[in-house]
Amino acid sequence: MSELMFDGIVRRMARKMAQKHITHALEALHYGGLFNFEECKREASQSFWAKKNKFAVFDQAYYGEWYWLGSDDALKGWRRFERVEGYQDGWRAQVLSLAYNGWVNARVIEQFGWVDEVVGQQYINCKRHLDKLNWVDAPHDEKSVGAQVG
């Protein structure tokens, strides 16, 4: 079996496990039960597929499912799984992306203030770097300049 095919199987198994854990987490949240992410982490790290892969293929795919859930929640103004690293990263990345594009989810601001220290600091740092750029001497794309004027 080729390594690419094996990596594909590992990714699929990681995504399936993450989806199972996400379903469990959402059900616990919906029905008022307790969700313990530590158990999920333990199951993922002890998985046959996590142990058999190289280059953290399993970890990245498992993490990715949580990342996308966090990203989707940020668009909806939700923040549901604060202790899950992948979820938090996806949530923050989406909120920053919205902010860089000039729009922030009003529900996020209302519920969480101007988000959190990590997002706020990243936004400030990025803005500081953008402000230092020399916009006057920067190369211009004539096509886009002409399209705006005409």
Image (tube, rainbow, N blue to C red):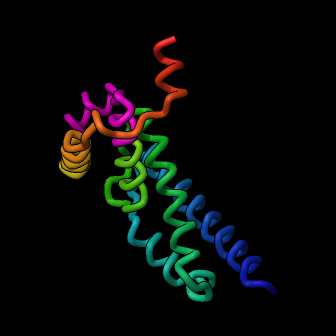
Query: Along the horizontal axis of the image, is 5 left or right of 106?
Result: right
Number of numbered markers:
0
Q: Is residue 118 above or below residue 145?
A: below
Q: Residue furthest right?
A: 1
Query: Residue 13: x and y, percent?
Result: 66, 71
Seen from the viewer's position, the closer of residues 140 and 53 is 140
Quarter of the image with the N terminus in it: bottom right
Query: Residue 109: x and y, percent?
Result: 26, 31
Query: Along the horizontal axis of the image, is 125 left or right of 150?
Result: left
Q: Residue furthest top?
A: 150
Query: Residue 125: x and y, percent?
Result: 20, 49
- The quadrant in which residue 8 appears is bottom right
Q: Is residue 107 above or below residue 28?
A: above
Seen from the viewer's position, the closer of residues 131 and 15 is 131
Check residue 20 for magenta coloring.
no
Residue drawn where x is 34% and y is 39% of the image: 138
Residue drawn where x is 26% and y is 33% of the image: 111
Query: Along the horizontal axis of the image, is 94 left or right of 135?
Result: right
Note whether residue 119 is visible: yes
Q: Is residue 38 above or below residue 34?
A: below
Residue drawn where x is 54% and y is 82% of the image: 55
- Please report the bounds of the magenta region as a residue range: 95-116
Query: Residue 68: x and y, percent?
Result: 51, 50
Residue drawn where x is 57% and y is 81% of the image: 50
Check residue 110 for magenta coloring.
yes
Note whether residue 116 is visible: no
Seen from the viewer's position, the closer of residues 23 and 149 is 149
